[in-house]
């Protein structure tokens, strides 16, 4: 297959360096780069049609120049089509129901000779019928133009090429035209921040790595692949040029691909490109998470990483600048200011930093709960064993794990409050896991039954009188008045700098993680359910 020629260039659409102007319905800040196999550079004009591929009402007739050949993606609209499409398969991945994990189908990213990208879909009943190889060029006869999904789109086109009952797919070993290898849609930090938590289109990120799982990038850096595999994710601190540093979480296959590529380089790679990332607020900071559609590239893998590496080598002062902190730190407030914020009608979910002194461990409440070892949801006692309370959990047998769910009363110079300590924050307060404290109690009290509620341990009582820096979350339940307790997501010693480790999230659709953020969210749900059941006094 010959990939050495340049992709055809349309003269109707204006292009700029490294970007292709958006058409009518493309996100106004989205930037796209089309690359061919070996010679097309982002600084050259990308192969993009002058027609509007995003208009669902566009004429469905073939373009005159191609009427006797194939339909171009810009001519694809909604409805059944008895026509041929010629394209390169960029990438494909499984789509599963996030709750049941049942296979929905295979999703694909396709690109045609004009550099137009469209999403493809094969229903579950037809998965396995078609032999798919990423990078190959295909001819598809007959398809259905379905509407693109509104959430987590990976292409600008309003239509999706769905394989139907009469679809026929064949490989083109020697395609008559050159089709670009790939196309990227990059967002800047500001654009990711503007679209944070929107569940909208998924854009691509490129930048250089500062830290990997807390380790500084060095020439002889070794990844702990066993730990990464157990946790199913890794965290990379990334920076684009001299912009803010962000945390990029790679999950499951993206994490495995990262490890494989990282090891494949003779020298430690510097540049990282991850496609279709989801911008989210995690622990009060902007972070990016990979999705099931994400791909990972490094230094010399594709043209955009080569270009960025060239820039990085010419700007070593930025590459060597130590900026390990993530921007958008929680704002320091007093307890009085915290409650004032909660009372404002315009307030939203947010994270704050509070310095407060622990007055007491609140009595009358259990200081821990038993969680499912698989998803960290609350476990309840069944007839013969524990049962996970989370209907989405796939674990049928598990061992219960004690987790912190401790209420403490705190105060500062302005106000008093009740904080609830969840999950890892409890260990940060006492230095011990809840499971360890519970196990120690039962070892010291052999005659106590398994259903016995362990009293508040000395490790928690010893924290009374300590002044700590708490990272707290104002939740929807605080804003709606359903609960007055404030959730603590992290605890720091008074003099410790606020590091960028305030939460972890999963980007894979429907996957359940074992992260601090997951534990905190599920423990909050348990806390609020318990408060709802508690009879009101007075």
Image (tube, rainbow, N blue to C red):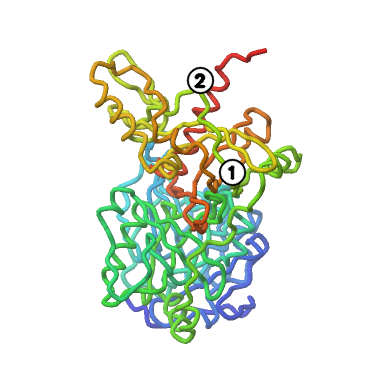
**Crowdedness of circle 1 by 10 Å Cα count: few (<14), some, many (20+)?**
many
Q: Which residue is depicted at the point 56% across and 56% down? A: 286
- Mark 1 vs mark 2: give the one in front: 1
In this view, the residue in front, 167 or 6, is 6
Where the N terminus falls, by quadrant?
bottom left
**Residue 159 position (above or below residue 432):** below
Q: CA distance from mark 1 to mark 2?
A: 22 Å
In this view, the residue in front, 105 or 506, is 506
In this view, the residue in front, 201 or 288, is 288
Assign a secondary structure to mark 1.
Answer: strand
Q: Which mark is residue 441?
A: none
In this view, the residue in front, 98 or 159, is 98
**Whole-percent x and y of residue 446?**
23, 20
**Crowdedness of circle 2 by 10 Å Cα count: few (<14), some, many (20+)?**
few
Q: Residue 305 is drawn in which quadrant? A: bottom left
Question: Does residue 358 appear in this view?
Answer: yes
Q: Earlier in the sequence, mark 1 or mark 2?
A: 1
Question: Does residue 79 appear in this view?
Answer: no
**Whole-percent x and y of residue 429?**
45, 42
**Whole-percent x and y of residue 400?**
32, 28
Q: Which mark is residue 356?
A: 1
Q: Which residue is mark 2?
A: 364
Assign a secondary structure to mark 2.
Answer: loop
Quick check: 168 left or right of 472? left
Q: Residue 390 is drawn in which quadrant? A: top left
Q: Which residue is depicted at the point 57% across and 43% down? A: 472
């Amino acid at each position: 297959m010959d990939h050495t020629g340049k992709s055809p260039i349309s003269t109707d659409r204006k292009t700029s360096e490294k970007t292709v102007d958006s058409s009518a319905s493309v996100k106004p800040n989205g930037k796209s780069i089309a690359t061919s196999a070996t010679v097309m550079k982002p600084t050259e004009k990308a192969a993009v049609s002058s027609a509007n591929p995003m208009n669902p009402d566009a004429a469905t007739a073939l373009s005159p120049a191609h009427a006797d050949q194939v339909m171009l993606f810009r001519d694809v609209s909604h409805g059944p089509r008895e026509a041929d499409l010629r394209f390169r398969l960029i990438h494909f991945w499984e789509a599963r129901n996030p709750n049941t994990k049942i296979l929905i189908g295979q999703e694909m990213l396709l690109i045609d000779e004009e550099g137009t990208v469209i999403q493809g879909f094969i229903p579950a009943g037809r998965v396995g019928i078609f032999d798919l190889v990423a990078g190959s060029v295909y001819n598809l006869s007959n398809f259905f133009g379905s509407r693109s999904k509104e959430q987590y789109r990976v292409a600008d086109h309003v239509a999706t090429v769905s394989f139907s009952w009469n679809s026929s797919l064949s490989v083109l070993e020697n395609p008559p035209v050159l089709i670009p290898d790939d196309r990227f849609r990059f967002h800047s930090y500001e654009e990711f921040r503007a679209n944070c938590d929107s569940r909208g289109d998924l854009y691509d990120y490129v930048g250089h790595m500062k830290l990997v799982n807390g380790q500084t990038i060095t020439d002889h850096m070794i990844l702990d692949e066993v730990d990464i595999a157990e946790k199913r994710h890794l965290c990379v601190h990334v920076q684009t040029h001299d912009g803010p540093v962000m945390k990029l979480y790679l999950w499951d296959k993206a994490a495995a691909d990262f490890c494989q590529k990282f090891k494949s380089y003779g020298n430690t790679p510097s540049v990282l490109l991850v496609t279709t990332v989801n911008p989210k607020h995690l622990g009060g900071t902007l972070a990016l998470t990979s999705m099931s559609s994400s791909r990972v590239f490094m230094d010399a893998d594709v043209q955009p990483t080569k270009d960025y590496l060239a820039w990085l080598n010419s700007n070593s002062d930025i590459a060597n600048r130590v900026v390990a902190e993530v921007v958008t730190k929680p704002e320091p407030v007093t307890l009085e200011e915290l409650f004032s914020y909660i009372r404002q009608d315009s307030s939203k979910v947010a994270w704050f930093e509070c310095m407060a002194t622990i007055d007491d461990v609140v009595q009358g409440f259990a200081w821990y709960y038993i969680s499912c070892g698989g998803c960290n949801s609350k476990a309840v006692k069944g007839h013969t064993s524990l049962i996970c309370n989370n209907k989405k959990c796939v674990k049928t047998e598990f061992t219960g794990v004690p987790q912190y769910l401790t209420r403490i009363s705190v105060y500062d110079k302005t106000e008093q409050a009740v904080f609830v300590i969840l999950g890892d924050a409890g260990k940060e307060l006492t230095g011990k896991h809840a499971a360890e404290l519970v196990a120690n109690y039962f070892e010291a009290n052999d005659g106590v039954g398994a259903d016995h509620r362990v009293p508040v341990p000395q490790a928690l009582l010893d924290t009374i009188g300590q002044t700590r820096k708490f990272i707290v979350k104002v939740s929807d339940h605080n804003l709606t008045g359903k609960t007055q307790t404030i959730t603590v997501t992290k605890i720091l010693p008074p003099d410790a700098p606020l590091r960028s480790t305030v939460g972890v999230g999963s980007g894979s659709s429907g996957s359940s993680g074992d992260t601090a953020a997951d534990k905190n969210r599920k423990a909050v749900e348990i806390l609020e359910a318990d408060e709802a059941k508690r009879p009101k006094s007075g």
